[in-house]
Image (cartoon, rainbow, N blue to C red):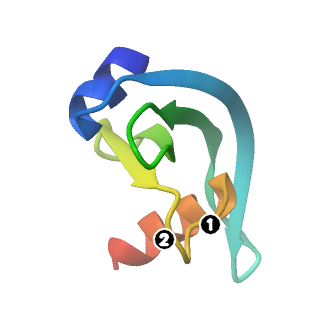
Amino acid sequence: MADIIGNKEKAPCRFIEGVHVVERFKGEVAWDGIVLVFGLDRPPEEVCYGWVDPSSETLVTVLNRPPVTSPETAVRAYIASRK
C-alpha cells in the first residue's frame, strides 16, 4: 500500500502504524476500520492517512493538515466531505 499512497501523493512514503478507528454518529457506528498512517518523505515532511472505503472500494488518503490531526479526525473529515 505504501507504493500506492506514494504514487497518489507524489512522494516516497513509509508505513508508520495502523490504527483501529470506530466513528459513531448519533449512537450508530458510522465507520469502523483500520487507518494506515504513512510518513511522506518530502519537504516539509508530512503524515498521510489512508484506507479503503468499503462502500466504494476506493483508496482514501487524507493529509495531516488542520483540522485533520489524527486518524480519527481524518475519518471524520472524509465522512463530512461525502455528505
Question: Where is residue 69 shown, x and y percent of the image?
Answer: 64, 64
The amino acid type of the residue labelled 1 equals Thr
Towards the viewer: 80 or 63: 63
Which residue is the site of mark 1?
73
Disc 2: CA contacts within 10 A as few (<14), some (14-19) or many (>=20)? some
Q: Seen in the image, is 61 located left or right of residue 21?
A: left
Q: Seen in the image, is 63 located left or right of residue 11?
A: right
Which residue is the site of mark 2?
77
Disc 1: CA contacts within 10 A as few (<14), some (14-19) or many (>=20)? some
Q: Quadrant of residue 74?
A: bottom right
| Gap in angstroms between the C-alphas marked 2 and 1 | 6 Å
The amino acid type of the residue labelled 2 equals Ala
Residue 1 can be seen in this image? no
Question: Where is residue 46 shown, x and y percent of the image?
Answer: 49, 47
Q: Quadrant of residue 34?
A: top right
* Above or below, 21 relative to 41: below
- Labelled pair 2, 1 in contact (Cβ < 8 Å): yes
Q: Residue at x 55, y 77 (%)?
A: 67
- Residue extending farthest to the front is 43
